Every structure is written in C-alpha cells, then in structure tokens.
Image (cartoon, grey):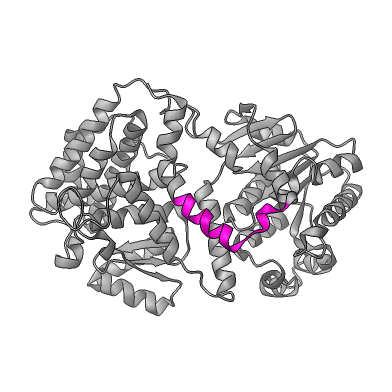
Amino acid sequence: MATQNTLGSRRNAAQLHALAGVERELRANDSSGRRKYLRDFSGAFRSYDSIIPSGQLADTINAADVVLIGDYHALPASQRFAATLLEERIQPGDRPVVLGVETIFSHHQHILEEWWRREILEDELRERIRFDTDWGYDWLPFYELLVTAREHAEGIYGLDCMPREDLRKISVRDRHAVDKIAEIRERHPKAVVLVLFGESHLAPEHLPRLLRQRLPGQRVLTVLQNVDPLYWQATSERHDPVQAVRVNRNVVCVFNSTPLEKYESYRLYLSRCQADAGQPDLVPTIYNLIDSLLCFLDINQYSAHNTTQPKFLVDLLPEVYAGSSDGRLRQLLLRAAGEVRKLDGMLRKVESQGTVYLPSINAFYVREFQMMYATEEAARFLHHACRGLPMCKNGKAATGKPSDRFYARTVEHVLAYFGSRVLYPARPAVRDQSGTNISGKSCQQLMRGALRGDRAEFDATAQKLGYMLGSELYDAYLRGGVSRTALRHLFLAHIEEPGNAWQAVQEIARKCRSSRKKPCGSVR
C-alpha cells in the first residue's frame, strides 16, 4: 500500500527536476527573494491545519467582510481565480461586491472610472494607466478580471501608490492600501470587499495586521494561492487532488496551479522583459520539460547505441517557434500537414491548446504558453524521438492496416497524456463515463467504430481512448503497479511496425487492470 511520502514522491519526481532548473535561472536573474519582507511571507506558511472539503470553501469565503486574495502576478491563473471567485460571490439578494486591485495606482482612479462608464475603450485604458510600463505582466487575464467586475460588482478601485520598484518603501504601500480599503468600506458599507494584492504583502504581519488594526470589527479572510510548502504537503494526501486547505482560522490556501507552472510563468516574464517586451525565449522552457521527462524515465539522451536507449536523442531535439505571424503559422503547419485538408484541424489545435508538436517536421509551435498542454506535447515529442522520429522519415505514425494506425495514434495519446500528468499532476483525470474498465475487447469495439467514420471521428476516438488509458496508466503508476522501467519500454516500443501498437494497447490495459487489485487510497 502506498504511503503518503511515497505518493508525494511519485507525483512530484519529474516536476521537482524541472523546477530545479527553473529556480537556478531565477536566482541568477532575480536576487530580490533574499529581502526580509519577502522572506516574511515564505516563512509564514509552512503547513496547514486541515483539508477543506469540496463545497466548503465558498461558505468560508462568504462569511468574510474583506477577502484578501494573494496574487502571483506572472501567473494568469491567479487573476482568473480572482475573477471566478468574484463572479461566484455574487448571489441574488446577497451583499454587493467591490473589487480593489494593486495593479492600478490610486491616482489613476479617474481613468478607471471613465472606462467603468464606457467612455473609453480597452486600449486607451491600458495606455493611460501605463499598464505595460509600470506593471508589465500579462494584460489579458487582468483585463478579464476588470470586465468581470464591471459586469457583476458595485465598483473597482486602484489601491497602489508609488514607488513600486523600491522594496525599502514597501511597508508604506501597505499602509496606503489599508487607507484606501478603509475608504472603500465607508463608501460601500454593506459590500463585501475583494482585494487582489501581491502574495508577499499578505504575510500575517504585513497588510492583514494593518487592516485588522484599522478595521477591527471586520471579518478579514486571507485567500492564498499555490503556496509552495502547502502544495508539497497536499500532494502527499490520499485525496487527489486537494483543492483547498485551511492554514488557520483566518487563512486558507487554494491550489489552481503547480509550482512548475508558477515559476515558468515568472521565468517567461523575465525573458520577455529582457527582450524589450518582445517574445520570450521558450526554447529553455520546452527543453527543460523534455529533460525532466528523460530523467523521470531514466533515459540517457547521450547514449550512442540503440538498445534500451534511443541513439543520440540529444541530437533529435526539436525546433521551437513562438508567436509568429498567422501567415508564418499557416506556412509552418502546411509543411507539417503535407496537405491543405489537414490544415484546419491543426489550426484548431493551436487555437485551443496554445502549443502543438509537429512530428513530421520535428518542431514545436507555441502561440500561448499553457503548462498543461506544453507538458503533453513534450511527452508526445519524446514518444516520437525514442523511436527515431519515424514521422520525419516516412511521414507515417505506423505502417500496415488501418487498425495499426488507429492503435498507434492511441498509444501516442496514452503516453502524451501520461507524461503531462507526470509533469503537471493538477491535470484532471479522464474517465469512461459509463464507469466500466477499459479492456482489450472495448478497445477493439472503439477501433471498429472509428474506422467506419471519417478522419475527424478516427482522430477523436483515438484521442478519447488514449486519454482514458493514459489516465488509468498514471493511476497505476501512483499505486506502484507500473514501474518506470516498464514506462520507459512503452516509450521505446516501435509501434510503427505492424501489430506492435495493438500489443502495446493490450499491455497497457493489462497493467492498468492488474494494478487495480492493489490496495491504495490515493486514487478515487
């Protein structure tokens, strides 16, 4: 039976390896983490009291008068969580809601109110509040928050003051923010005040203490997001996944991202700043994900022999394109597709996922970096590279009958989905809605149905089956029913040869089925 420590180790092994590389680069480029003010936050939240069951977080938040939401500025999920929380807090007949944000200086309040009254448009708002110059993080998730507030809240207020760059003045900014929140309370006495502020300001002795002193009768709740020590502790719980925890009576923490995604977002922000607001360099990010999967599977990318290792995988690393024009993107995808009729499907994938690996030309295209899909495509690349990039050589994932091609596509999706869960454990599981276990017989039934349909149905069925098997394979790995050696052999299996892909699907289904017999409370 898997212990809590074992579960945490299995869930986090690959992510920790990837995270180490990112953190080394961040320390080399940003020394501010050594400041006492920031260390106050990192040292304040080392463990939690209890898991918050699903549904109870809303009750906890609804009981507060002022909700301080910790913002990791470079992570879009932080701002989007605040927008979701605001929208869910609005209930018919309940108290109104007001939003306060650190992102906008208080002296720009008149500009914000012009936008609120729809006297100016988005572009003018962004320019006049000097968002890109004075803030510099992603505009879209923050603007989505503002739009949500304009549609549902009673008001929006800027809370910050200058200077932002001088950490010696940071406590002055805290006192100023508390003064502005007190003004909001006077102006909206019946409202719930939601405040989105940088997480380091929410250490107990920083903004929360000042606010309780200024507004002693108010129920103040701090809602943290993705705090590292709390995240690592939660990954060892038998509940999978833990969505929120109670740190103490006045503090909760929610998990909507992983440390790897959080710090990669910050690394990309720094890269974009160094490129003078141009495109960030995504090559180190993609290569770091690949390297972490290689380490997880114990694959030597420098091996000179094709035995249990791919030969010179280091020489097969892909090109990475980012943020090219639409014309360049279509040209790139057409090269990869080989024919116009495949182009629309590839464009839809880029639009929905932001990242796509193109095996026929061994290249990544990244329009919008989303960790969940970037990890999936990194695993997809590794699956092709372990077999010597067969798509680059003959343009086909498998030879033989149509059933061979179907099962080859299925195995590709199995390993891509599995790899994404290894690097991004927060990704939701994909289950068979009927609740039945996947067997060789059910795989064959799905295959026959896919072959009777068109190309779109063929691809969709292979993906559906692959994701479900990939999800079960990850569960089997957590239970200890599948070793890393067995997983490595799956990546190395030459499924392009007739009959091999079907054998691989049967082997995966068998391993998943046998692992269910192992007692483990970690998978539900």
Q: Residue at x 30, y 58 (%)?
A: 381
When the figure is inspected, residue 295 is found, relative to residue 137, above or below; the finding is above
**206 to the left or right of 254:** right
At which x and y percent is residue 282? Answer: 45, 66
Which quadrant holds residue 273? bottom right
Which quarter of the rendered picture does the C terminus lie within? top left
- Residue 92 seen in the current view: no
Q: Is residue 88 magenta?
A: no
- The range drawn in magenta is 18-35
Front position in the image: 415 or 8: 8
**478 to the left or right of 47:** left
Q: Residue reaching furthest bottom?
A: 327
Which quarter of the rendered picture does the N terminus lie within? top left
Q: Is residue 27 magenta?
A: yes
When the figure is inspected, residue 249 is found, relative to residue 360, above or below; the finding is above
Q: Residue at x 66, y 47 (%)?
A: 87
At which x and y percent is residue 133? Answer: 69, 73
**276 to the left or right of 190:** left
Which quadrant holds residue 67? top right
At which x and y percent is residue 430? Answer: 37, 40
At which x and y percent is residue 318? Answer: 31, 66
